[in-house]
Image (tube, grey):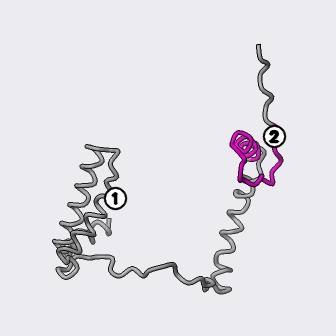
């Protein structure tokens, strides 16, 4: 309930043009979804939004935009997780591990993997480390 109160008390801080752009985008997305479901509405809205934002310089008018996006991939670095964070995450990891191992190594999961691997083409695929179930022999011909 406090969040709802906060929402209504801060309505005066909404930037009108930004809200108009967002609501128009949402309306176009919904319109495309219901009128032509096979058309990639999200892609159309994103491309149109980029073009209109650049042409009308919406950022200069106060519309919130993503801004500069750096090119390329970020540099590979080791995450800065210290011993404190590791110890903080350890109980959750220990709690999750039994369900993960049960799901991974259960007979049902192994049979599903074996069935899927025998029914799919194996060209250019490596074999699973799990034991394979031989494919069923073909029915006798009449």
Within 10 Å of disc 2 (Cα), the crowding (few <14, some 14-19, many 20+) is some
Task: Decide which of tag 1 and tag 2 comes sooner along the chain.
Answer: 1
Q: Position of residue 118 (x, y in %)?
A: 74, 41
- Disc 2 designates what residue? 133
Query: Magenta segment range?
Result: 110-134
Indicate left or right for 128 with 36 as reference: right
- Between 17 and 100, the one nearer to me in the picture: 17
Q: Position of residue 4 (x, y in %)?
A: 29, 65
Q: Which mark, by number, is residue 132?
A: none
The residue positioned 32% from the left and 64% from the top of the image is: 1
Farthest front residue in view: 123
Indicate left or right for 109 with 78 as reference: right
Q: Quadrant of residue 139?
A: top right
Labels 1, 2: front one: 1
Q: SS of the residue at dot 2?
A: loop
The residue positioned 24% from the left and 69% from the top of the image is: 51
Q: Disc 1 and disc 2: Cα gap in Å?
A: 44 Å
Q: Which mark, by number, is residue 43?
A: 1
Q: Position of residue 130 (x, y in %)?
A: 80, 51
Q: Is residue 93 above or below residue 117?
A: below
Indicate left or right for 69 with 98 as reference: left
Q: Position of residue 34 (x, y in %)?
A: 28, 44
């Amino acid at each position: 309930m406090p969040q709802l109160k906060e929402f209504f008390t801060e309505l005066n801080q909404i930037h009108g043009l930004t809200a108009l752009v967002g609501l128009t985008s949402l309306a176009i997305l919904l319109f495309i979804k219901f009128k032509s479901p096979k058309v990639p509405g999200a892609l159309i809205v994103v491309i149109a939004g980029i073009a209109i934002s650049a042409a009308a310089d919406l950022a200069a008018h106060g519309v919130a935009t993503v801004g500069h996006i750096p090119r390329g991939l970020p540099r590979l670095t080791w995450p800065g997780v210290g011993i404190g964070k590791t110890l903080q995450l350890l109980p959750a990891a220990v709690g999750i591990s039994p369900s993960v191992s049960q799901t991974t190594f259960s007979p049902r999961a192994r049979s599903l993997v074996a069935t899927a691997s025998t029914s799919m083409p194996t060209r250019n695929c490596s074999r699973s480390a799990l034991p394979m179930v031989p494919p069923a022999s073909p029915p006798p011909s009449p």
